[in-house]
Every structure is written in C-alpha cells, then in structure tokens.
Image (spheres, coloured by chain):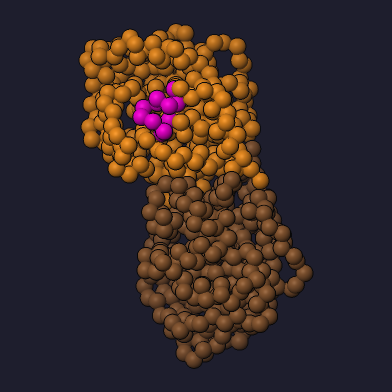
Chain colours: A brown, B orange
C-alpha cells in the first residue's frame, strides 16, 4: 500500500466513534464516570501526532469543561452532537487484565446516534471508523466520498450479529484494526496469518492484528511487520488500549502525509507507545500528559528491543 | 553477559536430557513410537549450527539405526547409556495446538537414569541441561566443573514438586529457558517482565522466555530483545518446539564461540527458526531435512518482518 496524500489543511483526520462515561474497576482500583469511548481514546492518542476532528454524540450531562479538554488537545469538537438525555455509559470490571467483563451498558443518547459530518470535514482524507454499528460506519462512508485512507475497528458483537453489514464495511476500507479473537471469528480461521490473508482478500490493503500483551502484527499483500508490546510493568486499566493504538497509528500516517512500509512501521510503533501510556492509568490520564520526549524515549527503547 | 570461550575442539556442546519414544496425536494425524525427548530435539536443532554430544539413557528396544541417525547429524552418542528394559515412552494428544495433554508417561529405564559424563566430555564448556529432574541436573553440574556457559530448561512439574532443588539449579546456571506459565509459577509474579527480573536476580545472566505462537523474549540485566514467532501456517505437531528452540540457540552460541548481545539476538532468531521447522511435521522430520539455505531464507524473512 503506497499512497501520497496532499497535506496542507489544518485537520485531515476524522474520527467517528463513541463518547462515553465509564465506570471501571481493575485490580488497581476503580473510577466512576470517567471520560472514555472509542472516538475519545483514539483522538487523544492521535493528538500526540496530529490534529483531528471527532464525530459523536453526548447527552446533556456532558460538561463544557470536558469539551474544552478535548479542544485543548488539537481535537475539533464541531462534530460532537448534543442530544437530549444521558451520555453513553459503560461499566466494566477487569479481574484478569486481559479481559473486560461488562457489567452494564446504557446506550442512552448513543442508541439513536445518527452521525452527521460537519461541512468542514466533508473533505477529510483520513477517516477512522471507531467501533460502532456497521450500519453507522456505512452511513459515514456515504457522506465522505473524498476519504482516501479509511480505517475501521470493530468487535465480536458486530461480527456475530451483523455480519453482512460488517462485510460491506470491510470491503470498503483500506485498513482494519482487529484483535486476534475477532479476526478468527470474522474469517472462521484459527491460524492468525491465514485469517489475515483472508481479510486482505476481502479488500483492505492493511490488516493490523492486535495481540494485547504480545504486541501487534501488520499484514499487507507483500508485507509483514511484527511489533512487540512495550514492556509495561504496572498495567492499571486496559480500557481504550485498542483505540489508543489505532489513534497513534492514524495520527502518525496523517502526520507523515503518505503511507508506505516505512510509515506503517513507524505508525505501528507509535500506536504501541500511545497504548502503553494509556494502560498505565485509568481513563487516558497518563497518555494525556505524556510529553513528546517521553513518547520518543519509549519509542527508541522499543526499537532497540526489536533491533538486530 | 559477555564471555569469550576458546574454540578449537571438535565438540564443545554437551546436552543432557530425555531420549524417548513418543505417541503423538494432533489435528493433523498421529504417530507411534517416534523418536523424541528433550536431548534429541535439542541436539537435532543444534546440529544445524554445531556438533554436540548427548547424555541420556535408552532401553534395549532402542535400535542401532536410530543411534546412527543421530551420529549422522554431528551428534556424538558416546554418552547414551543402554539399560535393561524399555526406553522412556510418552503419549500425548493436542486438541488445541497450544497445549499437550499427557495420556501416558512410562518412565521405564529413565526412572533410574544416573547421568554419567563420558571422559571425552568432561571438559565441555557449553552445557544444556534439558528438562529432567533437578537432582539429576545438579548431579551433572557436579561432574562438569569446567562448563563456562550453562543453560537449563525445566517444567511446571519440577517447579511445583521440587522447588528447592530447582532453586539450586537456577542459581548455578547462566541461561534459563522457561515458558510464560512456568516463569509465573517459579516467581509467583503475574507480570512476565517482573518475573524475568526476579529470575535474573536469582543468578542467571540471561532468561529466555518462550511464548509459543507469540515468539520469545530474551532478558538480561541491561538487555531486552523481542523475537516474533516465524509465521508458520501449518502447525502439525508442537512436540519439541521448546527443545528445538533451545538447541538452535545453544548451537548458535557455540558456533559463535562467544556470547554477547549480537550473538544472543542471532541465537534467539536461529532458535525461532529451528522451532518453526520442528513444528511443521511430526517428530523432527522436517527439521532434520531443513537445509542451510532454507534456514537462512526463513531467518532473513523473519529479520525483515521485525526490522524498522
């Protein structure tokens, strides 16, 4: 996959997904009503490399302060719709840090989410479709005819309940972020490399297989790249790890202004690093404050750990 | 860890472990009475890089042909003792390719194994203590006062049943091969990097954590190296994967004649490659016939998949 995309405008990355308040309990403690959601995690991670705009919906319990926090981090919130009711709310517990157990999901205003792309983003050329209903992902795709690099995420729930719609999404994207369990479900194949090839045959030019504590594998048609995880000792809260990986990845390719093997490798590493900060505190607290120097330091360490 | 070891003698690598006949059933088929055991797998893998001598015990059902097969592969069998009775026999099934279920273990002559080092090996400087009773590993160590680089393998059974003896072994070795489950049991720590550091604090200078389909991590005091797995599509029989990893690793450092970060990295990669051949057929059939060119080809591919 080699594409050159003109740079020049202020914000070229559009991120669609959930905006949520989460109650999370892990062996390290718990938080209530902390800001989360796939769009938020991805945009915060992307902000380390580029500006973005997010499209999502919140309820009337969503505070201006919270919106300002996003705006202060290169995130354009003109695509955030305020609806009557409460913001999407997720409660989960991690007894094992590798697996969230959902205690409660209150969709609230998210139940009737109908993504509307602000005029200022109709020309966005990089698009990240966070994990939402594939019907909504398709709807966004219809509105963004000029998107040149489209990436999507999904989850087992959609793979199992709306396979036909998801299939349509997968056939329209350039890049898919998917974890090991999901790619096995999606393809019916147990060998992850076979599964990756099958997804490549469906349309995407790049498959990013997320393997949690074992890192990530990027697979293209004639390309493969393994990135280990950044060796974090104190995992506090894994919520949003996949989204912050995707955000770091997308931010990197937007910043590069083109996509080739070198950029993909760097994007995978940057996504690995943003995810590593993300999981070391609740919500995105540590990621938010991670400086460019701290990110670069981890990046160089990881590259050293991988290098021959 | 930096050591220079004089080269010059024909065989500097001594491998102690089991020699077995295995009955193995996997989703790909089954074999009966096929040659296996930790010493055999390790020596066959090492033979791709260096000569070795093995120490083990077999029964009177062990054929001269089988011995010749080892001898034809740079494996000195003067340390193979013939005892009255049957050779060690293991039966196992893999329903899930990541986990062997033992159906039957008949120790036979292995029950009274009392390793005797042939005079010709008393000066061996590289020693691999395959997965056998820690009391036997200690006994070998007493006989090999000149060994300069000592590596050991073990398993959960010894970690749980003979922790004190195993502790003595760990404190005497330079290198330990251990899988993720095992290092968590050994240290009581759930974070694999914490566990690695704890093992390093016990004495070894290098811990090689085997992560199955996720590759391996090498941890030294100021050193870390992640190697991905070689992406194999058709896993036929995982038996001996860990031993063939260890054999490829040890063969490489013996061939190099010294041990430093560069050599360790190459050894990890070579171990990964020998293990990849090992699991693509029953017993060590494919590994045995793998040419230097085929090994080199996989090695270069893997290095490409890891490289920035």
Q: Is residue B262 above or below residue A68?
A: above
Is B123 left, or right, of B70 in this rendering?
right
> In terms of image quadrants, where is residue B160?
top left
User: Can residue A291 be spotted in the picture?
Assistant: no
Q: Which residues are magenta?
A: B278-288
Residue drawn at x 46%, y 15% as measured from the top left: B73
Quadrant holding the N terminus of chain B: top right
Asked whether A238 or B279 is in front, the reply is B279
In the figure, A180 relative to A138: above or below? above
Asked whether, in this view, residue A227 is left or right of residue B83, the answer is: right
Q: Is residue A168 magenta?
A: no
Where is residue B237? Give x, y as percent.
36, 34
Q: Tell me the residue at 52%/13% (across/down).
A: B11
Give percent across and percent down for residue A299. 66, 53
Task: Tell me which residue sits at (59%, 65%) in the image.
Answer: A150
Q: Residue at x 49, y 69 (%)?
A: A131
Total residue callouts: 0
The picture quadrant where one finds residue B253 is top right
Question: In this orientation, which residue lies closer to the viewer: A16 or A61?
Answer: A16
């Amino acid at each position: 996959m080699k594409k050159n995309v003109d740079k020049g405008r202020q914000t070229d990355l559009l991120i669609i997904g959930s905006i949520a308040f989460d109650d999370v309990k892990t062996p390290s403690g718990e938080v209530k009503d902390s800001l989360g959601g796939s769009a938020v995690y991805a945009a915060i991670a992307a902000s380390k490399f580029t500006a973005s705009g997010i499209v999502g919906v919140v309820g009337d319990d969503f505070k201006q302060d919270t919106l300002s926090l996003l705006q202060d981090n290169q995130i354009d919130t003109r695509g955030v719709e305020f609806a009557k009711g409460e913001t999407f709310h997720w409660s989960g517990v991690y007894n094992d840090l590798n697996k969230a157990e959902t205690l409660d999901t209150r969709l609230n205003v998210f139940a009737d989410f109908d993504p509307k792309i602000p005029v200022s983003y109709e020309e966005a050329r990089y698009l990240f479709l966070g994990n939402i209903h594939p019907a909504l992902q398709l709807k966004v795709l219809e509105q963004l005819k000029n998107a040149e690099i489209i990436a999507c995420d999904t989850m087992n729930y959609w793979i199992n309940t709306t396979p036909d719609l998801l299939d349509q999404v997968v056939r329209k994207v350039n890049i898919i972020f998917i974890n090991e369990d999901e790619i096995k479900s999606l393809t019916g194949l147990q060998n992850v490399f076979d599964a990756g090839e099958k997804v490549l045959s469906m349309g995407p030019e790049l498959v990013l297989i997320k393997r949690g504590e074992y890192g990530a594998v990027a697979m293209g048609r004639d390309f493969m790249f393994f990135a280990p995880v950044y060796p974090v000792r104190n995992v506090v809260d894994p919520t949003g790890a996949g989204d912050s990986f995707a955000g770091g990845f997308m931010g990197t390719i937007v910043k590069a202004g083109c996509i080739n093997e070198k950029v993909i490798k760097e994007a995978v590493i940057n996504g690995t690093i943003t995810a590593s900060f993300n999981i070391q505190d609740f919500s995105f607290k540590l990621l938010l404050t991670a400086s460019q120097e701290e990110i670069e330091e981890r990046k160089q360490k990881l590259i050293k750990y991988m290098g021959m």
